[in-house]
Amino acid sequence: MAKLILCAAKIGAGVRHRYIMLSQVKAYADRYGYRVRMLWGATGGVADHRHEELFAPIPGIDIQNISKHQLRSIADLCARDGGFVYHGEPFHVARSDRGYSERFFSWDLAGSEDLSMRVPRPIPQLVATPSAPIQADIRAWVGANRVHTRLGIRVRAIEQLHRTNRVHRIKAELDAALQALYRIPWYVPVFIVTDSEYIQQRLASHFADSVFVPKKFQDAEAGGRYVRRSDKDAMKTFIKEIGCLCACKKIISNGGFLNDASVEAKIIRAPYREAAYMNAAIA
C-alpha cells in the first residue's frame, strides 16, 4: 500500500488554521514520498461548510468531508493517545519519539508542526483558492469597486482573551487599533475587512472613499456587535472579502488573514507611512 498521511484539525479550527496545518503536512509528504488525505470537519469553525462549498480542490491533497460528530470522536481518541479505524484500516497518532511509519495520522498543529521540523525552510504555504462561484463574485466586486487601487485594511477582533498580540473584543483595544489607523490621511481610498461593526463604522467615517462587502453583525457583546462565525452566509462572505483584500494595492493586517503569506510583499506595518503616498501613486 502507498505511503499515506491522514490528518485532521481540531473541531474549532478556522480556515486559516486548517491551511497552515495542511501546508506543513504537505511539505513533509512531498519530501518523503507520502500521499496526503485530510479529514475536513464540517464544524462551526467553517460554519459547517464542506470543503468544496468554500474552496477549489487542492493539488496533491485528497479532502474527505466528515461530520462534527465523527471529528469529535477522533479528537477524543487522539486525546487518549489512541488510534481509530478509517475505512477498515487502523491508524495511530504519530509522535516524534516513536518515529513515523508508512501510514499514520497527524493531529492538528501539534502533529503538523512536528512534521514541518523535518523539512528545509521556508515551507511553501498553500493558497486557499475560493470555489468557482465565490471566485466569480470576487472578480465582479473587485472590478466594480476599483479594489486594485485601494489600501486594504484588515482588523480582526478575537474572542479568546488568552491570545496575546491580538486585538480583543474590548473597546479600549478597538480604540487603540483605530488611533493607529487614523494617522493615515482621510483621502486614501480603502477597502475594509473586519468582524467588528464598531471598527467598520469608525473607519468608514474617517476615510472619504471607503468600501466594504455588506454583511450582518449578529452577535452583541460589550465592545459592540460582531459577525457570527457560525453563520454559513457569513463564512462565504468572509472568503469573498479575503479574495478582494488580496487584490488590493497595499494591505494593513491586524490579526492576520487567510492567504496572507501569498501577498506578503503588499503588507505594510505600523506606523503605516507608505499609506500616505498611495493616493498620489495611483492617481
Image (spheres, helix red, strand yellow):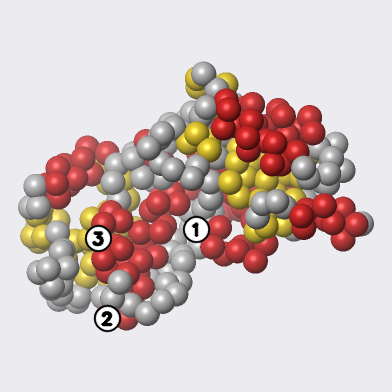
In the picture, the quarter occupied by the N terminus is: bottom left
SS label for mark 2:
helix
SS label for mark 1:
loop
Q: Which residue is mark 3?
A: 111
Residue 226 percent coordinates (x, y): 54, 27
Residue 13 percent coordinates (x, y): 36, 45
Label 1 vs label 3, nearer the camera: 3
Q: Earlier in the sequence, mark 2 or mark 1?
A: 2
SS label for mark 3:
helix
Dot 1 alpha-carbon crowd within 10 angstroms: few under 14, some 14 to 19, many 20 or more? many
Q: Which residue is mark 2?
A: 32
Residue 109 percent coordinates (x, y): 30, 56
Numbered badge on residue 128: 1
- To which quarter of the image does residue 75 belong? top left
| Amino acid type, callout 2 | Tyr
Instruction: Report the residue at 90% width, 57% height from top.
Output: 280
